Amino acid sequence: MRNSLRGISVCALLVLSQLHAAVHRGQVLFNRLPVPGASVLLSAGERKLSTTSDAEGKYTFKDLAEGEWDIRIEMQCFARIDGRIQTGQQSTWVLQILLDPPIEVQKPPTEEGPADSLVIQGSVNNAGPSAAFGNNRISAPQPYHGNAGLILDSSTLDARPYSLTGQRSEKPAFNRLTGLLSIGGPLRLPGVRRNGPNFVIDYQRLRSRDSSLGSALVPDALQRAGGTRQAQALLRFYPLPNFEGSTRFNYQVPLIGATHQDTLQARLNQRLSHGSQLSAAIDAQLSRSDRSSVFSFVDRDRSSGINARVNWHRSLTSRLAITMGLEFSRLSQQTIPHFANRVNVSGEAGIQGNSQDPADWGPPRLLFAGGIASLADGISSLQRNQTTGGSVRTVWNHGRHNLYFGGDYRRQQWNSLTQQDPRGTFTFNGQGGSDFAAFLRGIPDTSSIAYGNADKYFRTSQSDVHMTDDWRIGPGITLNAGVRWEYGSPATERYGRLVNLALGPGFSTAAPVVTAQVARPDRSAFEPRVGMSWRPRAGSSLVIRTGYGIYYNTSVYQTIAQRMAQQPPLSRTFSAQNGPGNPLSLADGFRGGSSTTQNTFAVDPDFRIGYAQNWQISIQRDLPGALVLSTTYLGIQGTRGMQEFLPNTVPIGAPNPCLACPAGFVFLASNGNSTRHAGQLQLRRRLRNGVAAGIGYTWSKSLDNAASVAQNWLDLRAERGLSNFDQRHLFTVQTQYSSFARRGLLLRDWTLTTDLTAGSGLPLNPVFPAAVPGTGFTGSIRPDFTGAPLYSAPNGLSLNPAAFRPPQPGRWGNAARNSITGPSAFSFNASLGRAFRLSDRLNADLRIDSTNPLNHVTFPSWNTVLNSAQFGLPNSANPMRSVQTTFRVRF
């Protein structure tokens, strides 16, 4: 759900980013260092706005009336700055320290707040108290500043993980400890008289041991009797039940994971000459983690990465500036499965036809439709990805126009040493009786495998050119218009090792073809964008914004290339369904036969990248009591979305009209489309008298037909249904209380924030677990809807199993895609923090963050697989209460 909400938020931000009302941005500096916590006040007639500078000394005022504003900047120990600004411009302000006359340090607190509190009443950004920083001290300024901190989270204050089985278990001991260290200042270079660059170095070290509860249905001692050699060899990895009395779960165990991570960040900033500046940054990270499963398999993950950036900025004139940048990043990720290079499970069990490379040793994956836990382990992989790129930006202020020009270029490498499914997969659907009984007899319903051509070297490039005009038409209206062209080249493999299918008319024939790239280039990604902000009356707080833009998805080729690289004749890949003409067994189910499908994936040679048209209109107005009311309508129309289907397939029990036609492969086309409409109402209270709050409600509906794999390839319109991220109702509440007006050392300067989110559930898709005839693919068939009340469920369940039944012979299931509404969403988080002044050079921050402090259990989804023992039960539970404490000392 979080990923879905995150996707909705990105879509909304893409539109909002095109709407530029009158804005003023600036930065407050002292001795070329940023000054956080400076008070910035804008005034024009009776209207006044205020805020504080952030950690980089920057501040922003939005929704300003066009024209000139008076500005005042104040900071303890510094001389006040009074000036005048024009909306739309960016300003830099340099503070001068007050040394004479002496500054009176101790001042009694007033009703507006204590002497050392820098909270600004009516602040738009809801700033909290800010302590002294770096050189902003009473005594002589020091060139260097820094901080050291500790973040601690342990099982002492955290709640026990929620048990899906209802069985009480002891809470395992765990802890998460993060150390923080930062230092910055001027870099003294030997033999150089001029001031060296300013630097900042940050280091973080994480040591974490986490725990969760794993729940499963495993075979009991009676079920394990008998069976083939292969079945008994695989059964030994299943633990015995550790409790009784449930037909849905009978095993529960704590899952322990450990993570070690080191992160280093360094930044340099050097002024070369008047109007010229050079900055550089480098980030490096090393991570190691272990994760366990209910089978006690422990897989190891290792990763390391580096990211470097260099930017050069030059102010050519007072109205013209250019910025150029270079970037380089490299990421290495490795997964080492539990059995890799240790035990050849398949070989010892007599399972033939899968990969015998020691890196791929382990059991084949077993999938059971009836609810028994799937036997699975990770796949060995080594990824080395690299990106090199450059960018250029030009800003030209010309009268009422702010013109922005620029372009970017990135060259990307994805170097992969891995297999898609080297140990193979056996599926037991239970169509002929018990799925587990079929397993004991060694007769799977389907089998699939994909390995070979392990090393792959993918290459692609991304480029764009853009131009934007921010035009202040008049005192109350601003127009932002521009165009962007993007091009993402289709991925290629360095040695030309990609395979597609050459298809005859109507999918009458199919032949593998080795090709150099994923698809034909698509250079049509022109993206016009326009936004307008209008204040109907001068001096009024009423602002109307509207905008329209087109956005292309130019980063779709990587996953497609991965699948095309694992196809015959370069790899051993096939899927098969058990039947009289192709009997399968655990012993030789991966050997293939005359009726197996060799090539399991193909992409439309005319595949084109998709795009979305976004439009919106919003109205904002100030209300009495520091309130701001805004209403927004957002619309999105998606075109050429990715859509997958299985050509030449028929329902179970239906005659096949073309036995000679190729089947069993997934075909990817760009035929999908989508729509989303959303209305939002938001009421916000600016920080006043220590209290700020915001309440929001969003109604939305999202539809698409971009199913992962369509049920009926001849009726793709039937796949149109609710989008996976569709959330009809969403309610949010944010609050903040700052006790800067309280008297007493213990009560003042605390800041309490809360964040509550409640919403309707996300759509879930009903699944009938049977193989599509003529293929080894399971998961695209939906059941029939009986008409029984879906949510009038028996005790212990959230869904009624009687609402669905297997589809009628010769027909596809009539249940609509994503026709089940999942569990309601709810989250509540809170934090409490304060800054302490220990001396004129030393400050401390204390912050306590709690996720789910109410310890309220919520579930992300339910099991919707018909005939599964867990149908209608939660798949998992969201985290219970956790408490994290952060203590940081600044010097």
Image (cartoon, grey):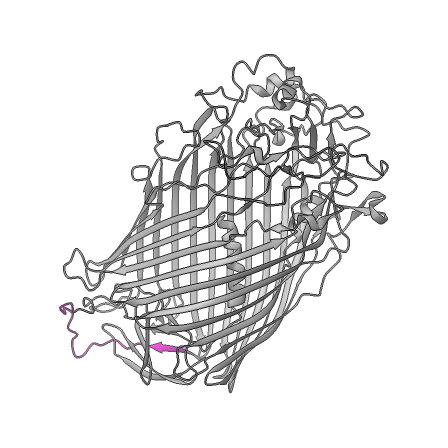
Question: In the image, 155: left or right of 450?
Answer: left
* Quarter of the rendering occupied by the C terminus: bottom left
* Magenta-colored span: 91-110
- Looking at the image, residue 450 sits to the left or right of residue 90; the answer is right
Check the image and report above or below for 592 versus 410: above
Observer able to see residue 658: yes
Image height check: is 151 above or below 8?
Answer: above
Q: Which residue is drawn at 71% across and 65% down?
A: 524
> Depth check: 588 or 680 in front?
680
Taking the spot 73% from the left edge, 30% from the top edge, the residue there is 577
Which residue lies at the image location 65% right of the left edge and 54% below the top edge? 556
Q: Position of residue 719 (x, y in %)?
A: 67, 48
- Residue 320 lies in the magenta-colored region: no
The reply to whether residue 130 is visible in this rendering is no
Residue in front for this viewpoint, 311 or 159: 159
Classified by dominant secondary structure, the portion drawn in magenta counts as loop
